[in-house]
Image: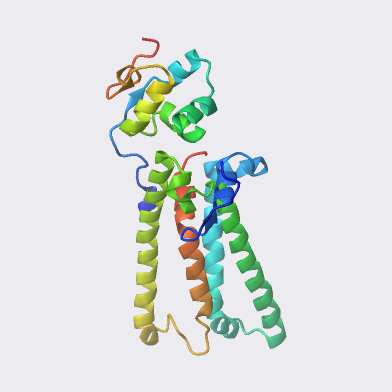
């Protein structure tokens, strides 16, 4: 059946959003407001269940005072590095 | 923010309506956010829609069950009212459960929500297409195999159920596929 198909077949994008957000003392809602998305989207991103567009990645990086390359990677990231 | 409640005629929603669903203002419906409960709702919606469609076969069923006229009128009326009410209520809950994303315009959603909505509509298009195709095939071969259009049956319930399905299918698919939201 079509609706039983994989939810996200695209290549995963690994990230350190949660780590950076917590370091700044921001809630998901705070970051969502800064990045202009719904707070659940932040949850999806942090769980690496959704790969953001370049525009959203740039907005999130700006909101967290980081470079995109510090936050996102195509290979698994070591947390806390 | 504009106080005017913008109406999106094409999508059949209002700005306030969608924004209300997107926030947690409806906290009393939090139980609808779990995937398990949403899937139960989807199954009930599908059963309700099938029950409405079955109204088109009532004369055949009545004959087969050998019901008296009085009994059949009561069963028919109660079932019809219950089924239509259940489907309408189910649709309302379904929209709350998926935060109305399936019906919302682009400007009220973020990129992830737009992507989910578009995928749901694509699957709904396929699904509805298959269902209509099967119905058309049954209509075509119906007179020969007596599966469809038996004498005296009213096809309007089938059309009503198709209308329900047309409106609800994107939300049903979204509700089925999404995790807890």
Q: Is residue B72 left or right of residue B9?
A: right
In the image, residue B3 sits, relative to residue A22, either above or below, namely below
How was this image coloured? rainbow
Residue sitting at 52 percent across and 47 percent down?
B98
Rendered location of residue B127, percent (x, y): 38, 60
Residue at (49% x, 90% y) in the render: B151
Q: Is residue A1 visible?
A: no
Q: Is residue A22 left or right of residue B65?
A: left
Q: Nearer the viewer, residue A38 or B158?
A: A38
Hey, which residue is sitting farthest top in the picture?
A: A81
Name the residue nearer the viewer: A17 or B149.
Answer: A17
Task: Answer above or below: position of A10 versus B90.
Answer: above
Residue located 46% across and 60% down the image: B10
- In this view of the protein, can residue B39 be seen by the observer? yes
Q: Residue at x 44, y 32 (%)?
A: A44
> Number of labelled discs?
0
| Residue A27 placement (x, y as % from top left) | 54, 23
The quarter of the picture where residue B82 lies is bottom right
From the top left corner, tell me how far across and down residue B163 is, in percent: 49, 69
- Is B24 rendered above or below residue B158? above
Quadrant location of the N terminus of chain B? Answer: top right
B131, above or below B65, in the image: above
In percent of width and height, residue B23 lies at: 58, 40
């Amino acid at each position: 059946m079509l609706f039983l198909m994989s939810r996200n077949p695209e290549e995963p994008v690994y990230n350190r959003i949660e780590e950076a957000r917590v370091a700044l003392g921001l809630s998901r809602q705070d970051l969502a407001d800064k990045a202009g998305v719904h707070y659940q989207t932040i949850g999806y991103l942090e769980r690496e269940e959704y790969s953001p567009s370049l525009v959203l990645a740039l907005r999130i990086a700006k909101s967290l005072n980081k470079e995109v390359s510090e936050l996102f990677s195509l290979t698994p990231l070591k947390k806390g590095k | 923010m504009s106080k005017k409640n913008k109406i999106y005629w094409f999508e059949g929603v209002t700005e306030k309506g969608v924004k209300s669903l997107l926030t947690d203002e409806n906290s009393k419906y939090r139980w609808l956010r779990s995937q398990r409960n949403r899937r139960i709702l989807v199954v009930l919606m599908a059963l309700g829609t099938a029950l409405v469609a079955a109204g088109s076969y009532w004369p055949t069923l009545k004959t087969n069950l050998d019901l008296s006229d009085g009994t059949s009128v009561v069963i028919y009326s109660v079932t019809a009212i219950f089924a239509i009410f259940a489907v309408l209520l189910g649709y309302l809950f379904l929209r709350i459960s998926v935060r109305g994303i399936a019906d919302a315009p682009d400007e009220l959603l973020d990129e992830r929500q737009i992507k989910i909505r578009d995928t749901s509509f694509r699957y709904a298009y396929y699904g509805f297409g298959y269902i209509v195709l099967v119905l058309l095939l049954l209509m075509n071969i119906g007179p020969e195999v007596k599966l469809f259009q038996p004498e005296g049956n009213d096809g309007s319930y089938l059309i009503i159920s198709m209308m329900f399905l047309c409106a609800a299918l994107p939300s049903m698919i979204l509700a089925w596929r999404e995790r807890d939201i």
